[in-house]
């Protein structure tokens, strides 16, 4: 798979090199046409039209690639969020595994201690049984004489009763000790059995959590491979976007050059026409009556002076608007007029009503779920304002405003993401699947464009 990817990249680079070579040859051909156009009075319109068509096609392709970049960026961001969530779950599982391992170790110590206690209780029971056997054997071997002898030797009835009670208590004591040892043995045995059962459950949990950890780790690895694929696609898309931008720039320069050459040719033709008229006038003056030569000369000088002034005046008028137009274009990169600020605040307040609602990729519902551009589209639609569907297209609507002049209701574009400015340096936007629609600092990312629609 990796070898196939390398070969694909190799062929892609070769094709890109061919395309760039074709573009260079195409631009060289256009420049050659421009140079040839200087020697004629008019530049063929097809050359300029062709350049404009090429520029429009490149702009259309650039918009398409920009949409792809936005989509890939959003999908990559969603997978990165999912990786963070799975990593957090994996960390919790690994911590749980560590805790269970400690519990298993402690449980084993308890089992070992219970085993020792069980063996001690068992030994005490055996010792007590042996002691009782010896006493019973002794009394059996002596027969009833020892018991009767003790009773006969009693000094009185009270002594007789005391000795009889002694034998009864001795027997009861032996039985009590034996039963106590047996109970202790059974309790310790039950404890040992319970601990072993708990140990078995812990070991089963440990195995289960380790299997879950391996599954999550594999899942993270798979998603990381997906992100790597997104990175490759983004790099390829960005490379295409750069090529289209370069082509647009080249076509724009070519069109400007063609227009400049057209203007130069028009001026040359105008100058030739004026010179022809000048020659005709001179010829007419020479053929005129030769009366009053001084008067004719004076009139001729006045005519020449007027002709020179008339030939210079249009050129100044033609050059002046171009300079003014260029200065005006430079001044109007931003239009910071306030617009309808109350309407903008109304839009911002309406958008804030949906904070907390979910983020859904491709969604356009303010209540059921939407993505960033679906959120702005739905909010503005409530006020009868139609917006394009994706964020890159929304970055071109309305008029451009500098961030220093931002006001509530303006759309802030961050490159693949949009939000609505509310006030106090904050925006409301459909952020991510994890956070949904929320309020954020307007400068949490670099602002690329501010667009005002009201």
Image: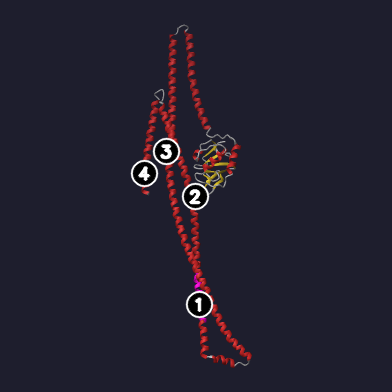
> Does residue 80 sit above or below 337 in this rendering?
below
Numbered mark located on residue 122 in the image: 1
For numbered disc 1, what is the local secondary structure? helix
Front label number (1 vs 2): 1
Does label 2 or label 4 sit earlier along the sequence? Answer: 4
For numbered disc 2, what is the local secondary structure? helix
For numbered disc 3, what is the local secondary structure? helix
Give how far apart the Cα atoms at labels 1 and 2 are: 60 Å
User: What is the span of residues highlighted in magenta in the rendered image?
Assistant: 108-128
Front label number (3 vs 2): 2
Disc 3: which residue? 243
Does label 3 or label 2 sit earlier along the sequence? Answer: 2
Q: Is 113 inside the magenta-drawn segment? A: yes
Given residues 369 and 302, the one toward you in this image is 369
Give how far apart the Cα atoms at labels 3 and 2 are: 31 Å
**Residue 353: percent from left, percent from top:** 59, 44
> Does residue 214 sit above or below 62 in this rendering?
below
């Amino acid at each position: 798979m990796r070898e196939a990817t390398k070969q694909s990249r190799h062929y892609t680079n070769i094709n890109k090199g061919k395309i760039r070579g074709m573009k260079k040859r195409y631009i060289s051909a256009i420049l050659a046409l421009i140079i040839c156009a200087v020697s004629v009075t008019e530049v063929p319109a097809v050359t300029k039209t062709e350049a404009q068509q090429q520029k429009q096609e490149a702009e259309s392709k650039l918009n398409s690639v920009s949409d792809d970049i936005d989509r890939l960026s959003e999908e990559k961001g969603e997978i990165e969020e999912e990786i963070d969530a799975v990593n957090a779950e994996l960390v919790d599982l690994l911590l749980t595994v560590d805790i269970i391992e400690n519990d298993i170790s402690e449980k084993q110590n308890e089992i070992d201690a219970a085993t020792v206690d069980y063996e001690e209780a068992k030994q005490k029971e055996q010792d007590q049984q042996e002691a009782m056997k010896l006493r019973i054997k002794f009394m059996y071997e002596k027969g009833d004489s020892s018991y009767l002898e003790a009773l006969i030797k009693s000094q009185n009835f009270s002594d007789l009763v005391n000795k009889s009670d002694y034998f009864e208590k001795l027997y009861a004591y032996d039985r009590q000790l034996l039963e106590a040892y047996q109970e202790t043995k059974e309790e310790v045995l039950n404890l040992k059995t319970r601990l072993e059962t708990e140990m078995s459950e812990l070991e089963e949990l440990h195995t289960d959590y380790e299997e879950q950890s391996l599954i999550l780790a594999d899942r993270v690895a798979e998603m990381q491979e997906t992100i790597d694929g997104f990175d490759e696609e983004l790099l390829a898309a960005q490379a295409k976007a750069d090529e289209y931008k370069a082509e647009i720039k080249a076509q724009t320069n070519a069109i400007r050059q063609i227009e400049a050459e057209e203007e130069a040719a028009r001026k040359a033709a105008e100058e030739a026409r004026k010179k022809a008229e000048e020659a005709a006038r001179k010829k007419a003056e020479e053929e005129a009556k030769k009366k009053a030569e001084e008067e004719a000369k004076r009139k001729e000088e006045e005519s020449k002076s007027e002709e020179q002034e008339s030939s210079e005046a249009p050129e100044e008028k033609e050059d002046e608007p171009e300079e003014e137009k260029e200065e005006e274009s430079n001044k109007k990169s931003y239009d910071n007029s306030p617009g309808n600020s109350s309407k903008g605040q109304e839009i911002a307040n309406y958008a804030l009503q949906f904070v907390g609602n979910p983020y859904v990729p491709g969604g356009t519902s303010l209540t059921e779920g939407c993505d960033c551009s679906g959120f702005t589209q739905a909010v503005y639609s409530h006020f009868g304002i139609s917006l394009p569907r994706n964020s890159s297209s929304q970055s071109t609507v309305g008029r451009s405003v500098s961030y220093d002049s931002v006001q509530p209701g303006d759309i802030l574009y961050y490159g693949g993401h949009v939000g609505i400015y509310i006030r106090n340096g904050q925006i409301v936007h459909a952020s991510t699947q994890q956070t949904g629609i929320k309020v954020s600092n307007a400068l949490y990312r670099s602002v690329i464009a501010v667009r005002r629609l009201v």
